[in-house]
Image (tube, rainbow, N blue to C red):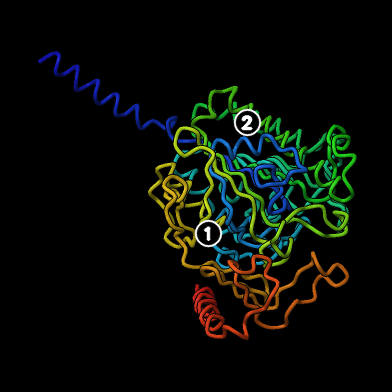
Amino acid sequence: MRYIVIFLWLSLWIGLEAQTPKDRPNVIIIYTDDQGTLDMGCYGAEDLYTPNMDKLAATGVRFTQSYAGAAVCSPSRASLLTGKTPSRAGLEGNATSQRGGEQGLPAHATTIAEVLSAAGYRTGHIGKWHLGYQADQMPNGQGFDFSFGHMGGCIDNYSHFFYWAGPNRHDLWRNGEEVWHDGEFFLDLMEAEAHDFIRSSHEEPFFLYYAINMPHYPLQASAEWRSYYADLPSPRREYAAFVSTIDEGIGRLLDQLERYGLRDNTLIILQSDHGHSTEVRTLGGGGYAGPYRGCKFSLFEGGIRVPSIVSYPTQIPQNEVREQMVAAMDWFPTILDYAGVSNVPADLEGRSIRSVVEEDSPSPHDHLIWKMGNRWAVRKGDWKLLFAPIDPASNPESPWNPVCEGLYLANLREDIGESENRITGHPEVASQLEAIYQTWLEQSQKD
């Protein structure tokens, strides 16, 4: 009897140990800013040196048809963190970049940080926020236990001032309190904060939203990489140097995980918020979208199809590619799936893509929808319908002039560059996709 009791006690102890919080995966989302569709070595960019991004792809799964929630910063981030389209998240356009402004992610929105925090995760935001400047819109009001970074759209990486719309103001915060690190490179500051967060959190599961504010302008690459790319033409030269600066920083973040023995039990997602910029502040371009039309601000593929990688060495396949249509809003339920969190908000539009990652199963989406002001797009299968699309990449003189004033129908299998409007030959397809959009819009307005 004594041995039976000992056996039962050991079995119970082992069972409880198997369910300890430490065994749940840590989660890190590395979100880059304005990184072009194909701007990694593993995506075929032969002129870029990105060994750490490529290493994540080699130890995980790389997507070729992954979509941002929007073609501009704030709504893309809102979609990622709420698991919804920006419209239903409550933020279709950019949030304010000035203190006191009210435009931002509504305080009542449920973020993944809030859900993971309730499930016992320590949650941290480091880097760019751009989802609101009111106290209840800032990271600590949206479920993050710790926050360090800038609240607006961009900063100078050494002075940490927002210069691009007056009044020029300093924009660097730790847990809602303004802090000053004059002359220190922002990515280095991010790395130091990440080290402290990981060191203090490694005994419990943690979620880190590591929102790198690069290669968004200003293009302030390190001297080493400026020298490395000296022979490339401008603006690719300046842009490439910034991308490799990012890559080096990602490598140091991975080293921190290795230092604490956490890499194998950490789910890492690396993704851009949308396509590359062609704005004058980024020297008119520098990013690479290959055959895809468009860039930042555009709902053509080059504006919303983004590089996306997931790596979790002990749980998912290595060095594999998925061609299914997935979206940034899918990471919310996917992370909850891996974390064993059953309390999934019922109103998510994103879907868990764990089976896509692990088993190469079909996409959970019949279609995807984007809405940015009066412009919108629907993709279903090979077909994509856009309303009043713009293409700043091919129209630098008048970047906001629409390519077409009305509906524009593209077939991505036959014309990946979306160069031809096929609506005349396929009006029934356009009608079907427009009906999908209108149904979604009506439901969104009710919600």
Question: How many numbered badges does the structure rendering display?
Answer: 2
Q: Pointer 1: what residue?
A: 325
- Counting from the top left corner in percent of width and height, residue 159 is at 86, 41
Position of residue 44 relative to residue 414, above or below, is above
Give yes or no for contact between labels 2 and 1 (Cβ–Cβ under 8 Å).
no
- Counting from the top left corner in percent of width and height, residue 347 is at 45, 63
Which residue is located at x 60 percent, y 67 percent?
A: 412
Does residue 323 appear left or right of residue 276 in this picture? left
Which amino acid, by three-letter code, is at mark 1?
A: Met
Toward the viewer: 90 or 301?
Answer: 301
- Which badge, 2 or 1, is on the more N-terminal residue? 2
Which residue is located at x 62 percent, y 58 percent?
A: 68
Does residue 162 appear left or right of residue 45 in this picture? right
Label 2, label 1: how far apart the Cα atoms are? 28 Å
Tell me the number on the disc at residue 254: 2
The image quadrant of residue 369 is: bottom right
- Counting from the top left corner in percent of width and height, residue 365 is at 47, 63
Toward the viewer: 21 or 270?
Answer: 270
Which amino acid, by three-letter code, is at mark 2?
A: Leu
Position of residue 157 relative to residue 375, above or below, is above
**Badge 1: residue crowd in 10 Å (few <14, some 14–19, many ≥20):** many
Secondary element at tag 2? helix
Specify the farthest residue to the front.
414
User: The N terminus is located in which quarter?
Assistant: top left
Toward the viewer: 129 or 25?
Answer: 25
Which residue is located at x 51 percent, y 81 percent?
A: 432
The image quadrant of residue 427 is: bottom right
Secondary element at tag 1? loop
